[in-house]
Image (cartoon, grey):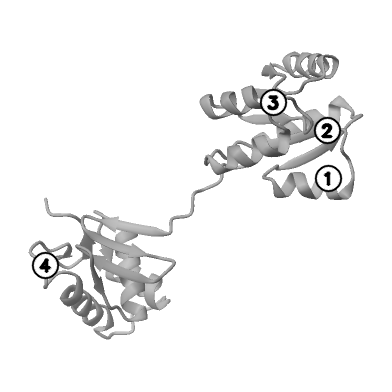
């Protein structure tokens, strides 16, 4: 595991770095917050261990800047500031865990290992795009070539499912389950009717079709090939 320790106390830094190295981890140490931020955004680390009171850039500002830059590396604050307000401030700044000094190395190691085991944070998509067709999931709006397309709720959900599966065939059964929450065949033309209406809105006014029927199987949404 690659760990970046940002700690300006030489004795504490040496103690932590030695212990982590003895456990087989690679531990890089920096004593300045500005240098730490640069290193954390330049290189890939599994966990950051960050003191709050640092020269150059304090630990809270460092982590806030890191999160603003889109870096999701787990952060453990290791600090002498142990009040409830201090802990809350650290976690709200973007820290994932908080350990106060003095500390037992065994606890620090357990917390570092726990952070490293966490699954990576998945980026939540708020917009989808296929060719010039755009779907804003927050505003619940669809546009093609910049033109707004009015969709009914089920049409929007249908289009979302198709766009999330761009280039793949989505079967009628899959659409019944994901759009209508049917786990049986209602023996109606509800899918075909809605696909027809959707195609009339997103394809027919435009030169190139995006929504394609795959005979006897289902439908596929993709850019012209």
| Spatial CA span between label 1 and label 4 | 57 Å
Lower sequence index among marks 1 and 2: 2
Q: Which residue is mark 4?
A: 206
CA gap, disc 1 to disc 2? 10 Å
Q: Residue furthest front?
A: 56
Q: Label 4 near label 1: C-beta < 8 Å? A: no
Q: Which residue is mark 3?
A: 56
- Dot 4 alpha-carbon crowd within 10 angstroms: few under 14, some 14 to 19, many 20 or more: few
Task: Kindly indicate the quadrant of the structure image that contains residue 162.
Answer: bottom left
> Where in the figure is residue 31, as x and y percent of width and height?
72, 19
Residue at mark 4 to residue at mark 3: CA–CA distance: 56 Å
Q: Is residue 180 above or below residue 121?
A: below
Q: Which residue is mark 1?
A: 86
Question: Horizontally, is 85 left or right of 70 in the view?
Answer: right
Q: Earlier in the sequence, mark 4 or mark 3?
A: 3
Q: Is residue 93 above or below residue 151?
A: above
How packed mark 3 is, by other alpha carbons closer than 10 Å (few <14, some 14-19, many 20 or more), is: few
**Cα distance in 3D space between marks 2 and 4:** 60 Å
Whole-angstrom CA distance, mark 3 to mark 1, is 20 Å
Contact? badges 3 and 1 (CB < 8 Å): no
Which is nearer the N-term, disc 1 or disc 4? 1
Measured as percent of width and height from the top left, residue 225 is found at: 11, 50
Task: Please state which of residues 137 and 216 is positioned toward the viewer in this rendering.
Answer: 137
* Label 2 sits on residue: 79
Residue at 29%, 61% in the rendered image: 134
């Amino acid at each position: 595991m690659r760990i970046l320790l940002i700690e300006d106390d030489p004795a504490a830094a040496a103690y932590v770095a030695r212990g982590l190295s003895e456990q087989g981890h690679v531990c890089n140490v920096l004593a300045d917050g500005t240098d730490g931020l640069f290193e954390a955004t330049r290189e890939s680390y599994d966990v950051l261990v960050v003191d709050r009171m640092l020269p150059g850039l304090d630990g809270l500002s460092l982590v806030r800047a890191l999160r603003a830059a889109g870096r999701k590396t787990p952060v453990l604050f290791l600090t002498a500031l142990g009040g409830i307000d201090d802990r809350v401030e650290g976690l709200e700044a973007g820290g994932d865990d908080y350990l106060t000094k003095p500390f037992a190395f065994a606890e620090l190691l357990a917390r570092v290992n726990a952070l490293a085991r966490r699954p990576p944070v998945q980026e939540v998509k708020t917009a989808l795009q296929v060719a010039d067709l755009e779907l804003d999931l927050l505003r619940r709006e669809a546009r093609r070539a910049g033109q707004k397309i009015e969709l009914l709720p089920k049409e929007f959900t249908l289009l979302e499912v198709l766009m999330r599966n761009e280039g793949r065939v989505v079967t009628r059964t899959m659409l019944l389950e994901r759009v209508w929450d049917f786990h049986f065949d209602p023996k109606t033309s509800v899918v075909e009717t809605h696909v027809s209406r959707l195609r009339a809105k997103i394809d027919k006014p435009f030169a190139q079709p995006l929504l394609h029927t795959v005979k006897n199987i289902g439908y596929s949404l993709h850019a012209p090939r």
